[in-house]
Image (tube, grey):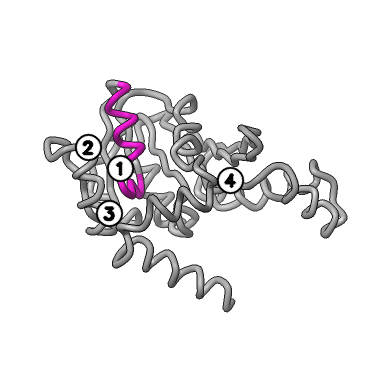
Amino acid sequence: MLIRTFMRVFFHLLYHPFAFTYDLVAAVVSFGQWKNWGQSILPFIDGTRILELGHGPGHLQRFLLDLKLDPVAIDESAQMGRLAQKRIGLSHKLTRGLAQTLPFANESFDCAISTFPTEYIFDLRTLAEIKRVLKPGGRLVVLPAAFPSNQFLKWLYKVTGESPQALDDALKKRLIAPFTQAGFLTNVQIKDVKSNRLVILIAQI
């Protein structure tokens, strides 16, 4: 409980008064791989009308625009909105709001995406809203976590006494549960990329 409270406070500070430090913090914790991790979801995107939940400083919006897609983005943080606007230009409109009450019409998007979201992405209200704004057959792609695949995993296997496959299966089961409850057909892929493991969740309606 204490750790969860600390993390909630930490992310609030990082996304609001200390948003200007976000890129530096992300680069440090990812050993410079943060942008590459974010781009790892691009092959899973389906369609051209894309909704990004929690756009942060706008890196993924920039990638989507460069790919000639038609992205829309929303974030709760005004500070992040200002950072993203500087990166992608004033002509590209960003929306400030909550994922639990998306200000978009029904069946507006081919695909919704979110990279390293906080716990709001597992909220059933968020998932109901995502289903509402996705077109029939639409897809939600989430990158919830990434972690080193070398010494850290060896330590984790040793401490838990579990095999790599058992830990992977446990992680997948835990992640899939809320999406299944919300009515998505869901699978989780774990990709090894440059000594890192990326967890990518694909939820289809």
The residue lying furthest to the bottom in this view is: 2
Expressed as whole percent of the image width and height from the top left, the position of residue 127 reads 43, 49
Identify the mark nearer the N-term, 4 or 3.
Answer: 3
Marks 1/3 in contact by CB < 8 Å: the verdict is: yes
Dot 2: what SS? helix
Identify the mark nearer the N-term, 2 or 3.
Answer: 3
Near mark 3 (Cα within 10 A), the count class, few <14, some 14-19 or many ≥20, is many
Dot 3: what SS? helix
- Identify whether 139 is placed above or below 105: above
Expressed as whole percent of the image width and height from the top left, the position of residue 187 reads 61, 36
Dot 4: what SS? strand
The residue under label 3 is which amino acid type? Met
Marks 1/2 in contact by CB < 8 Å: the verdict is: yes
Q: Residue at x 16, y 41 (%)?
A: 93
Q: CA distance from mark 4 to mark 2?
A: 26 Å
Q: Is residue 47 left or right of residue 90?
A: right
Q: How many marks?
A: 4
Residue 88: numbered disc = 2
Q: CA distance from mark 2 to mark 3?
A: 12 Å
Dot 1: what SS? loop
Marks 4/2 in contact by CB < 8 Å: the verdict is: no
What range of the chain is rendered magenta?
Answer: 53-67
- Identify whether 152 is placed above or below 65: below
The residue under label 2 is which amino acid type? Ile
Residue 146: numbered disc = 4
Residue 80: numbered disc = 3
Q: CA distance from mark 1 to mark 2?
A: 7 Å
Q: Is residue 102 left or right of residue 32?
A: left
Identify the mark nearer the N-term, 4 or 2.
Answer: 2
Expressed as whole percent of the image width and height from the top left, the position of residue 149 reads 70, 42
Check disc 1 and report the residue beneath it: 58
Near mark 1 (Cα within 10 A), the count class, few <14, some 14-19 or many ≥20, is many
